[in-house]
Amino acid sequence: MKTFICLTVLFFTAASFISVHAQSVQLYLAIIKAKNNTNHKGILQKVDSSSVIITSEKGIETIPFQFIKSIKIRVPKKSYEIKNFTPNTNKNTKYKLNGEGKFVDEWGNEEPSLTDIKDNLIASVLGNLLINSAALPFSKINPSVSKFKINYDKASFTSQLNELSYYSIYYQANPDIPTELRKLKEMSSKFKQ
């Protein structure tokens, strides 16, 4: 019985350790300015020594570095959802006839008239319209995370290749850990000197 409990505890400890240290993949939107004033926009899949691969609405696109002027990396935005700011105070309110012949709720508040309801409805609709129309443009603001100027040049593309690949799904799922550790050691040795 003790071995079963020990194995169970060991299993759950290992499972929680693995899930905590599992790397999550962040999606990045690549906006590529190419020759002839064409733009390509999609999720950055992979970067290799000769091209950039994205998934766009057209499907998978491979864009060679010779056609790339610049690349902007952004975080994809979620679409804006319209919010309702109308207070609903009349929910399940029951009105009873009091001694003065007026309908009141349990706290003594009079039942609103049709004009009061109409005025409140118009005010809440206008308020919702103004708030949502002002909030919509702010939700579309999406600053670039990083910018890369390639200018159709292989040397420029090669020098920025590693940094650009950090944003790709492929690299995030399959990081080159030995190379990264070697870079960290080189950087730390420069700081020690």
Image (cartoon, rainbow, N blue to C red):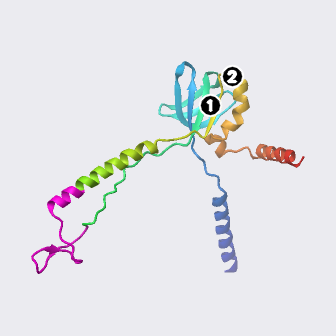
170, 132: nearer the viewer: 132
Marker disc for residue 160: none
- At x 86% / y 44%, what residue is drawn? 190
The residue tagged with tag 2: helix, strand or loop? loop
Left or right for 87, reference 100:
right
> Splitting the image into 4 quarters, where does residue 121 fall?
bottom left
Dot 2 alpha-carbon crowd within 10 angstroms: few under 14, some 14 to 19, many 20 or more: some
Find residue 40 and report its horizontal and vertical position in percent: 53, 29
- At x 71% / y 27%, what residue is drawn? 156
Q: Amino acid at mark 2?
A: Asp
Per the image, the residue denoted by label 1 is 52
Q: Give the distance between the C-alpha atoms of the residues marked 1 and 2, in whole angstroms.
A: 14 Å
Q: Is residue 101 magenta?
A: yes
Find residue 4 and report its horizontal and vertical position in percent: 66, 76
Left or right for 183, reference 153:
right
Whether 30 is drawn above or below 182: the answer is above
Whether 81 is drawn above or below 94: the answer is above
First in sequence, mark 1 or 2: give its number: 1
Stretch of the chain drawn in magenta: 91-120
Left or right for 142, reference 149:
left
Per the image, the residue denoted by label 2 is 153
Q: Amino acid at mark 1?
A: Val
